[in-house]
Image (cartoon, helix red, strand yellow):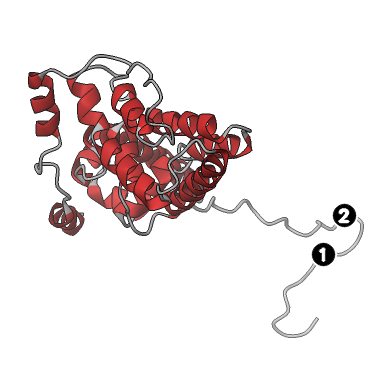
Amino acid sequence: MTVGEEPTASGPNAPGPIAPGPTAPGPTSPAPRQRRDARRNRDRLVEAAHAVFSEQGLDAPLDVIARRAGVGNATLYRHFPTRAALVDAVFRDQLTGTMAAGERARTAPDAWTALTGYLGAVFATLAADRGTNDLMTTRLPDIEALQAVHAHNRRTVELLLERARAQGTVRPDVTTEDLLFALAALGRAVPPLTTATAPDAWHRPLALFLDGLRATPSAPPRPLPGSALTEAELGEVLGEMGPHRTTRPAEDARAKDRA
């Protein structure tokens, strides 16, 4: 044994090596719980945004959405940095129904029946809530799902008009842009119309418009569905379409600054 060396026992009765003792537990990672909380907050924001957009349209204040979801503005902007991102998350899945209706219409043998059926499906969607109506009747930038739907809708209308003109059931001078413009203008009136009258009140003006597209205007017209507007109802509808429903970029900016 050299100087400074600790004596060691030897032989069959010598103790074995000392096992290391238990170590103090380290901090557990909060990541899984944080991810669950984040996902729950995101789902609540999407649900609240759908409800608020349905009631007030896409210009609804983001403050209202955050409060209804039970979170702060900072949480909203952490998940959705822009209004467009939130709108895309809310409506992406719902807009696929319109595209599916377009695909079915494209394969129908009679173009006029396909066109009227497709537009009826579109207007039923427009009547469902103000948020969807805003999406379908305006142009909003930076919403990927919406751009795809608009492109698909335009192509569907274009194909059906081409076939209907070839079959002699649509006026030869009507263009795709003519139809899309008129439908957007008429579609914007659907929410106030249904609010002032009945949920299916849009059937009547749509039927009147479609009859104007027919290639045989001298044929006996079909009876218009529903009831004509009264003077008071017309005034209420036009009031609901007034300029008080404006976008809120400044209000959204202030909410983000407070976040």
Please give the name of the residue rendered at 32% of the width and 54% of the height, measured from the top-left corner.
140
Task: Decide if residue 49 is in sight here.
Answer: no
In the rendered image, residue 107, in percent from the top left (x then y), is placed at 63, 37
In the rendered image, residue 65, in percent from the top left (x then y), is placed at 25, 39
Instruction: Tell whether label 1 touches label 2 (CB within 8 Å).
Output: yes
Q: CA distance from mark 2 to mark 1?
A: 8 Å
Q: Which mark is residue 13?
A: 2
Q: Nearer the viewer, residue 86 or 16?
A: 86
Q: Nearer the viewer, residue 31 or 243?
A: 243
Identify whether 91 is placed above or below 155: above
In the rendered image, residue 234, in percent from the top left (x then y), is placed at 12, 25
- SS state under label 1: loop
Please state, as top left, top right, bottom left or bottom right, where the C terminus lies in the image: bottom left
Bin the neighbour count of mark 1 within 10 Å (Cα to Cα): few under 14, some 14-19, many 20 and up.
Answer: few
Please state, as top left, top right, bottom left or bottom right, where the N terminus lies in the image: bottom right
Q: Which mark is residue 9?
A: 1
Give the amino acid at mark 1. Ala
Give the amino acid at mark 2. Asn
Query: Left of 148 or right of it: where is 8?
Result: right
Q: Nearer the viewer, residue 1 or 105?
A: 105
Q: Quadrant of residue 130?
A: top left
Q: Nearer the viewer, residue 9 or 224?
A: 224
Bin the neighbour count of mark 2 within 10 Å (Cα to Cα): few under 14, some 14-19, many 20 and up.
Answer: few
Task: Decide if residue 203 is in sight here.
Answer: yes
